[in-house]
Structure formats: C-alpha cells, structure tokens
Image: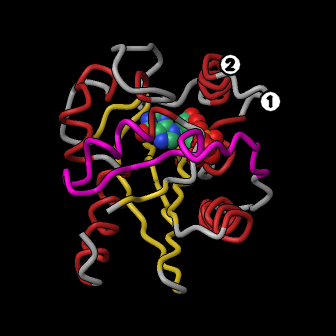
C-alpha cells in the first residue's frame, strides 16, 4: 500500500520507512512534488498535525497522514512543545534551539521532558488521530550523532545514553514516533489495508 506522509522532514521519513512493514511504501511531500511550506498556525500538536494533513487532502485530493511532534519540558511548562522546530526563531536553527533551552533551564538539575508525536490520518473519507510519547531527561551537552533535532540532548527513561547515542534501531523501538506509527499500522490493518 502507498502512504503519503505530509512532511518535508526527511529524518521523519527515514524513521517511518523503517517503522512500517515492507508492504507499505512511504512517499514524502517531495516525492509528490509538493514543495510548498505549509503554515503551522495551530497552537497544539493536534491542530498542526491536522493542518498539514488537511492541506494535502484538500489541495491535492489525496489520502495521507502527517506528524506534528515536539519536545515538552516540564520545568518550561511544556515548552518548546509545538514550537520545537522554531523555538529560537523562524529560521528553524537546531543549534540555536538547543542553546535557548539550555539557557532557560539554567540551574535545573536533570530536567524531565517528553517527546510527543501526534499523527493525523485521512483515509477513505474519515480522519483519525494517534499519539505517541516517550519520557526522559534533558542533558546539558550534546551526545551522539544519530537521529536529528533534540536527539543528542534527550535521554529516554531507563537508559543512560541519548537518542543520538542509542541509534535508530533502539529509538525506533521506544520513541514517540514508533508508538504513534504502531497505532497507525494497527488501524490500517483493522481496515484491512496492507
Ligand atoms: P514537518 O512539519 O514538515 O513534518 P518539521 O521538522 O517542521 O517537519 P514539526 O513541525 O513536527 O516538524 O517539528 C518538530 C520538531 O521537534 C523537529 O523539527 C525537531 O526539532 C523536534 N523533534 C520532533 N521529533 C523529534 C525526534 O524524534 N528527535 C529529535 N527531535 C525531534
């Protein structure tokens, strides 16, 4: 089955390709020649996930799913959350985002946080939403080169290495995106689409 993933983020695409069974083919926005920036005007992950999936459904007439995700830090009242990609400004600079988080967390010992991912799916005239979450802690140095975004500063609960150090095989067993993907695949299977 072909699945259109309404994202421009190639890291998300490569994770999804490893997360879904081989019988599913994932196509990104680039693959369908959609290069438009979809404005994320929502105030929650749920709203932005819906905005991205709706854009493709109604502009291109295609079923698809989207993922809006973010890092929610308890000591920052859930920020950067929905602003995770552009926390330090609209240029979406990952290094600056991390620097800003460290500055705001100054003095907080081993801050707790979670990654949360919300998927929005359009399928045969119906819509569905799935959530995945992984809890952990933030560290004040970058460790590991695997993954993307905040992976080098996030240690998932039960581990002593960051997602950046653990690599995609372990991340894909426990991550927020892995949990949301599992719910997506379960639903597609229930609808007997595979
Ligand atoms: P699309 O909107 O095109 O999907 P995006 O990167 O802008 O791509 P989001 O709006 O969902 O995606 O922003 C999510 C940001 O949260 C992302 O850019 C990372 O900074 C961070 N993030 C989300 N999931 C992550 C993960 O698994 N590991 C590290 N950082 C992550």
Say whether disc 1 or disc 2 marks the residue closer to the N-terminus: 1
Magenta-tinted stretch: 13-39
Q: Tell me where residue 180 sits by quadrant.
A: bottom left
Residue 80 found in image quarter: top right
Residue 80 in view:
no
* Mark 1 secondary-structure assignment: loop
Using the rendered image of the protein, determine whether residue 54 is visible from the camera's viewpoint. yes
Place of residue 7 in the rendered image (x, y in percent of width and height, measured from the top left): 57, 46
Categorize mark 1 by other alpha carbons within 10 Å: few (<14), some (14-19), many (20+). few
Whether pointer 1 and pointer 2 mark residues with C-beta atoms closer than 8 Å, the reply is yes
**Residue on which disc 1 sits:** 89
**Which quadrant would the C terminus be assigned to in this image?**
bottom left
Image coordinates of residue 81 in percent, x first then y, are 61, 49
Instruction: Write down the residue under mark 2.
Output: 96
Residue 72 in picture, x, y percent from top left: 53, 48
Instruction: Identify which residue is drawn at 49% across, 61% down.
Output: 118
Q: In the image, is 146 to the left or to the right of 117? A: left
Task: Say whether residue 130 is left or right of residue 24.
Answer: right
- The correct choice, above or below, for 50 with respect to 114 in the image is below
């Amino acid at each position: 089955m072909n699945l259109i993933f309404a994202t421009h983020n190639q890291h998300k695409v490569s994770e999804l390709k490893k997360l879904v069974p081989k019988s599913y083919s994932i196509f990104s926005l680039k693959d369908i020649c959609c290069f438009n920036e979809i404005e994320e005007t929502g105030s929650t992950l749920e709203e932005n996930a819906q905005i991205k999936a709706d854009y493709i459904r109604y502009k291109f007439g295609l079923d698809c799913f989207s993922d809006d995700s973010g890092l929610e830090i308890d000591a920052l009242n859930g920020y950067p959350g929905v602003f995770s990609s552009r926390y330090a400004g609209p240029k979406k600079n990952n290094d600056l985002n991390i620097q800003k988080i460290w500055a705001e967390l100054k003095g907080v010992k081993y801050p707790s946080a979670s990654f949360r991912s919300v998927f929005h799916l359009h399928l045969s005239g119906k819509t569905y939403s799935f959530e995945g979450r992984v809890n952990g802690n933030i560290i004040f140095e970058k460790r590991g080169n695997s993954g993307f975004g905040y992976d080098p500063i996030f240690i998932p609960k039960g581990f002593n290495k960051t997602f950046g150090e653990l690599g995609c095989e372990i991340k894909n067993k426990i991550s927020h995106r892995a949990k949301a993907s599992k719910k997506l695949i379960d639903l597609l299977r229930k609808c007997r689409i595979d």
